[in-house]
Image (cartoon, grey):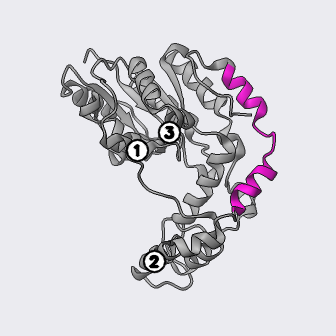
Amino acid sequence: MTRPLLLHVGYHKTATTWMQNALFTPVHGYRQVLSHKEVFDGLLRPHGLQFAPDAMRDLIAERRAQVPDNETPVISSELISGNPFFGGRESDDYARRLRDVAPDARILVSIREQTRILPSVYMQYIRRGGTMPIARFFDGESELGYFGFAPEHFEYDRLVGLYQDLFGAENVFVLPQEGLRKAMDDTAASLAEFAGNTGFQGLSPEARKVRGASDPEYAVPVLRRVNHIRTSALDRTPAISLGPASDSVFKGTSYLLRRPFVNSMFKARTPVSDYVRSRFAGHYAASNARLRDLVRHPVDLTSYK
């Protein structure tokens, strides 16, 4: 276990799936030692009054011992940054749990400029079965004690600062998704250097392929209404349910709305992005300024206003 453990904690919607499926692989000198389910069951699911770090600490040590000497062990799960639909309020508790189970780890925090990540979060909310209109979702808390979206969850300096306090500022690496888009090779190489991954020799051709596409924003009014008849993670018992067929209805509707003939007519309609830019204009300026002061390694945050 001579190589340090790299802990990738999210955020959601920052190319985390690409990193897990394409970057953190043996061909790039990495090996993932826990699955999403193992992270959830051992680190996140336990109630705060019941969490005991010993079992997770032992499992991580066991898995790290199995990693070849020429590979860097990785745990990557955006779940650790908290659930953005409900404000990510558990993210600080999860960070402290990580310190208890892997105090020698190096931390990767992947981020994305807020006016771009917030629309993606809402579109993910729709894909997971959400039914709230755009403004209602971003309003957050609607009843005392019942939490919803919280804009402070995306004030990145707060979580980055906490991880720096827990693990040391030199052991926290901030990776903007924009860097992967503009300079994929250089960004991946910088991360490998931070992780102590001497086996990284550049990205494979497979890792360069762009995967997946979100539902278009113009589809929101239709997909949101389909969710009223769909059993989903956010609504287990809808008033009207088509049962297992409801997922097929959603997927079929999504497919049709992404067809070129529909896209050509409505692609200019971006109601979620328009709302976010208006609602949160200037909201994150102070946080992003603090983030620039916190980050110890060279990183381009010029788009973060």
Residue 213 percent location from the top left of the image: 48, 58
Tag 1–tag 3 contact (CB < 8 Å)? no
Residue at screen point 47% across, 35% down = 9
Which of the pair 11/201 is nearer the observer? 201
Q: Nearer the viewer, residue 4 or 116?
A: 116
Query: To which residue does mark 2 refer?
Result: 252
Residues packed near mark 3 inside 10 Å, few (<14), some (14 to 19) or many (20 plus): many
Mark found first going from the N terminus, 1 or 3: 3
Q: Position of residue 82 (x, y in %)?
A: 54, 44
In the image, residue 21 sits, relative to residue 165, either above or below, namely below
- At label 3, which amino acid type do we have? Gly
Where does the image place residue 21, in percent across and percent down from the top left? 34, 44
Residue 269: x, y in percent? Answer: 70, 65
Q: Quadrant of the N terminus?
A: top left
- Name the side, left or right, on which 197 lies relative to 240: left
Q: In the rendered structure, which amino acid carries the disc numbered 1? A: Trp
User: In which image quadrant can residue 43 be found?
Assistant: top left
The dot on residue 28 is none
Question: Position of 146 compared to 167: left or right?
Answer: right
Residue 285 lies, with reference to residue 2, above or below; the image says: below
Residues drawn in magenta? 270-292
Q: Residue 133: say if magenta.
A: no
* Dot 1: element: helix
